[in-house]
Image (tube, rainbow, N blue to C red):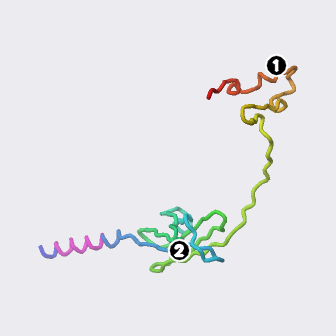
Amino acid sequence: MKTAIILSLLSFLFHIQTNAQNTIEGRVTDKVTRQPLESATVTLQQEGDGNIINYTLTDVDGCFQLSSSSLKDRTITVFYMGYRKKTVPVLAGRPLTIELEQEAIMLKEVQIRSGRVWGRQDTLKYDLTRFASSKDRNVSDVLKNFPASMWKRTEL
């Protein structure tokens, strides 16, 4: 009887130990200024296949905390707008300090054109050339191309 109780107790303790969560703590900062980066995205991933196991955002001090059932073959990846993505291996028992380098983002060319309709105080102006097509013969044909919402009168 005592043996059965001891075995049950050992089995229970082993079960608790294997299901324990490991905690990973760290801080994300700017590499040059050493200032904390708030709201950086931190993901815990399986090494190799890249499956996300857990994720969080950094707090005002750039700190984060993640938990996982295992730390074996895990990596941390940090994303922050305007900074280069960084991936580091998880080191058990040590808080991580992750320094991100700024990275310029090249945007595609944008063309800004005036709208088809614009207004000033109580007057609306229309650029008829933006509504006209090669099939139109007169102004009446062009007016038929106006969206129906423009014909509705709004009252104050």
- Spatial CA distance of label 1 from label 2 is 66 Å
Instruction: Locate the N terminus and report the quarter of the image it occupies.
Output: bottom left
On screen, residue 101 above or below 132: below
- Badge 1 vs badge 2, beta-carbon distance below 8 Å: no
Q: In the rendering, at what x and y percent does residue 131 appear?
A: 80, 29
Which amino acid type is marked by label 1? Answer: Ser
User: Disc 1 vs disc 2: which is toward the camera?
Assistant: 1
Which amino acid type is marked by label 2? Answer: Arg
The disc, 1 or 2, on the residue closer to the chain's N-terminal end is: 2
Q: Residue at x 49, y 69 (%)?
A: 64
Q: The magenta stretch spans which residues?
A: 4-15
Q: Is residue 26 magenta?
A: no
| Closest to the observer, 148 or 105 | 148
| Closest to the observer, 153 or 5 | 153
Q: In the rendering, at what x and y percent does residue 119 appear?
A: 74, 35
Q: Residues within 10 Å of mark 2 (few under 14, many from 20)?
A: some
Q: Quadrant of residue 136?
A: top right
Q: Residues within 10 Å of mark 1 (few under 14, many from 20)?
A: few
On screen, residue 144 above or below 59: above
Q: Main secondary structure of the magenta part?
A: helix
Residue 106 appears left or right of 85: right
Residue 103 appears left or right of 18: right
Quick one: SS at disc 2?
A: strand
> Residue 119's mark?
none
Q: In the rendering, at what x and y percent does residue 103 appear?
A: 70, 68
Q: Report the residue marked by disc 2.
A: 27
> Residue 140's mark?
1
Q: Residue at x 83, y 29 (%)?
A: 128
Q: In the rendering, at what x and y percent does residue 111 appear?
A: 80, 47
